[in-house]
Image (tube, grey):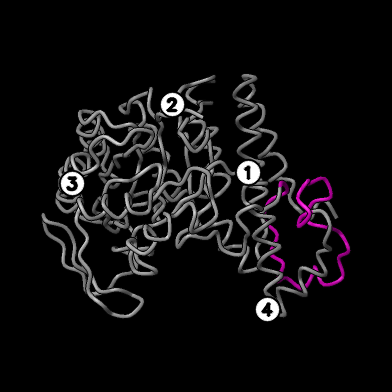
Amino acid sequence: MSERFSFRLLATEGRARRGEITMPRGTVRTPAFMPVGTAGSVKAMYPDQVRELGADIILGNVYHLMLRPGAERVARLGGLHDFARWPHPILTDSGGFQVMSLAGLRKLDETGVVFKSHVDGSMHSLTPERSIEIQGLLDSDIQMQLDECIRLPADRAEIERAMEMSLRWAERCRIAFGEQPGKAMFGIVQGGDDVALRLRSAAGLAELDLKGYAVGGLAVGEPQAVMLGILDETLPAMPTDKPRYLMGVGTPDDIVESVRRGIDMFDCVMPTRAGRHGLAFTRRGKVNLRNARHADDHRPLDEESPCPAARDYSRAYLHHLVRSDEALGAMLLTWNNLAYYQSLMASLRDAIERSAFEDRAASIRDEWRRGDIAAL
């Protein structure tokens, strides 16, 4: 284990990158998908299961953990790694997106944001400095700057105002973070769907010489073509020797296309949330287990999968669990989905190492196109 934070590229194919992030708590193989453990747990999964599927790192969230159970309490109990029984790397999101999407009655200014908790209506203050303080109390390995997230579509003036304030907040976060050996703070490129603003944001953050950079404010309802167009223009302006993290993305198709453009890290609630709602991701595409056509189907989700949830349970049984609202259904489908996501990432990493990314991407798409019905 390294005593410092570092990133190195091992291989490239076009703009696709295969690398490694090394930290005292472990190495993250990139491109990487980070299962979302918002409140200190990956929903419906044991920590050991998540690790066994191939996850090198998980994500926690400032907004949720500051409300329950409280960052100071987590610190007293040994930090988030001990609290959640995950001794491997953890990235914490700063809470900015959740304040936008979940909190009621919020007031935002240069200082930070005051908001009403969605849990109990209590009032809280979150500044750039407090966000970094909370992430320090949680003892996360990668800490994200506090930024202002806005809903799209929005006026250019509003997008510009939020982007500029996020840049100022990034500098305040960097100062608050200081020097923490073995840890990193990432900045977040903002600018909505305006390429010029994105480039200004990327340039401003590069001047701070941070250890990693994220692209935020995407995957919020805009068409995929818009998101990919923003990445096409923005990524060449971001440092090539630092990790690049696309926040909140996404579907398997989003991931393949974003890896093609040079993204190294992803997170999304999609595989866990879909699993709790009866939707399975497989190499043959999506399978909705709520559909009646599965009621008499003895086949597993994927007879070739190494994951027991995909290989050992019939679709008829999974359909029954989902339709009966049994907790085991959510557990098995979440297990299957995270297994698929991690196998997809491993496949992409292997392909880049062998200079076979485009061939692999084409074969993945071919299986998706053939679909699940064709396997009947």
User: Do callouts 3 and 1 mark residues in contact (Cβ within 8 Å)?
Assistant: no
Q: Earlier in the sequence, mark 3 or mark 2?
A: 2
Q: Dot 1 lies on which element?
A: helix
User: Do callouts 4 and 2 mark residues in contact (Cβ within 8 Å)?
Assistant: no
Which residue shows up at 11% across the image and 56% down it?
Answer: 111
Question: Which residue lies under the disc numbered 1?
Answer: 342
Q: Does residue 177 lie above or below 27 as drawn? A: below
Amino acid under disc 3: Trp
Q: Dot 2 lies on which element?
A: strand
Q: Does residue 117 lie above or below 176 as drawn? A: below
**Tag in front: 4 or 2:** 2
Amino acid under disc 2: Phe
Whether 282 is among the magenta residues is no
Q: Earlier in the sequence, mark 3 or mark 1?
A: 3
Q: Quadrant of residue 347?
A: top right
**Tag in front: 3 or 2:** 2
Q: Dot 4 lies on which element?
A: loop
Between the residue at mark 3 and the residue at mark 1, the CA separation in whole angstroms equals: 33 Å
Q: Which mark is residue 325?
A: 4
Q: Dot 3 lies on which element?
A: helix
- Picture coordinates of residue 266, whole percent (x, y): 48, 43
Residue range in magenta is: 283-310
- Residue 169 left/right relative to 307: left
Question: Which residue lies under the disc numbered 3?
Answer: 169
Which residue shows up at 65% across the image and 20% down it?
Answer: 354
